Amino acid sequence: MIKKLRPKDYGEVLHVGHYFRKGVPVVMDLTGLPDDVARQLVDFSAGLICGRGGDMERLGPKVFLLQPAARPRISPAHVPDLAHVAE
């Protein structure tokens, strides 16, 4: 299972952390956010990756794949509905 999230503001970053800590890969689509808010979510995600282990990969402008450490790696081409973004 891959959880796709499109946060509307920084307050929704809790959902990103919730799924990531449960071991669920998260696609975080920040395309609807202003650059400064998107940067805050990326900073949070980078801290999450650093503290919990895992990996963060850019799939496209403002679209990121967060993969927990304990999961097998997912190729961006295998992310449903976002394969077109991973060029």
Image (cartoon, rainbow, N blue to C red):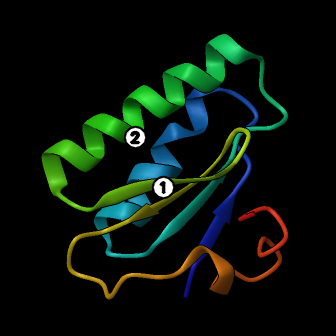
- Residue at point 42% right, 75% down? 24
Where does label 1 land, which residue?
Answer: 57
Secondary structure of the residue carrying tag 2 is: helix
Q: Between 52 and 82, which is closer to the camera in this rendering?
A: 82
Image quarter where the C terminus lies is bottom right
- Residue at point 49% right, 33% down? 42
36 versus 8 height, above or below: above
For label 1, the crowd category at 10 Å Cα-Cα, with few meaning under 14, some 14 to 19 and many 20 or more, is few
Secondary structure of the residue carrying tag 1 is: strand
**Percent position of residue 61, x then y:** 74, 40
Image quarter where the N terminus lies is bottom right
Q: Which of marks 2 and 1 is in front?
A: 1
Q: In this view, does 21 lie to the left or right of 39?
A: left
- Residue at point 71% right, 65% down? 86
Q: Within the image, what quadrant is residue 9 found in? A: top right
Q: Could you tell which of marks 2 and 1 lies nearer the N-terminus?
A: 2
Q: Between 56 and 16, which is closer to the camera in this rendering?
A: 56
Q: Between 76 and 8, which is closer to the camera in this rendering?
A: 76
For label 2, the crowd category at 10 Å Cα-Cα, with few meaning under 14, some 14 to 19 and many 20 or more, is many
- Residue at point 30% right, 84% down? 71
Q: Within the image, what quadrant is residue 72 found in? A: bottom left
Amino acid under label 2? Ser
**Percent position of residue 32, x then y:** 85, 34
Residue reaching furthest top? 36
The numbered mark at residue 45 is 2
Q: How many labels does the image show?
A: 2
Amino acid under label 1? Glu
Q: Within the image, what quadrant is residue 83 found in? A: bottom right
Q: Is residue 80 left or right of residue 50?
A: right
Q: Distance between the residues labelled 2 and 1?
A: 11 Å
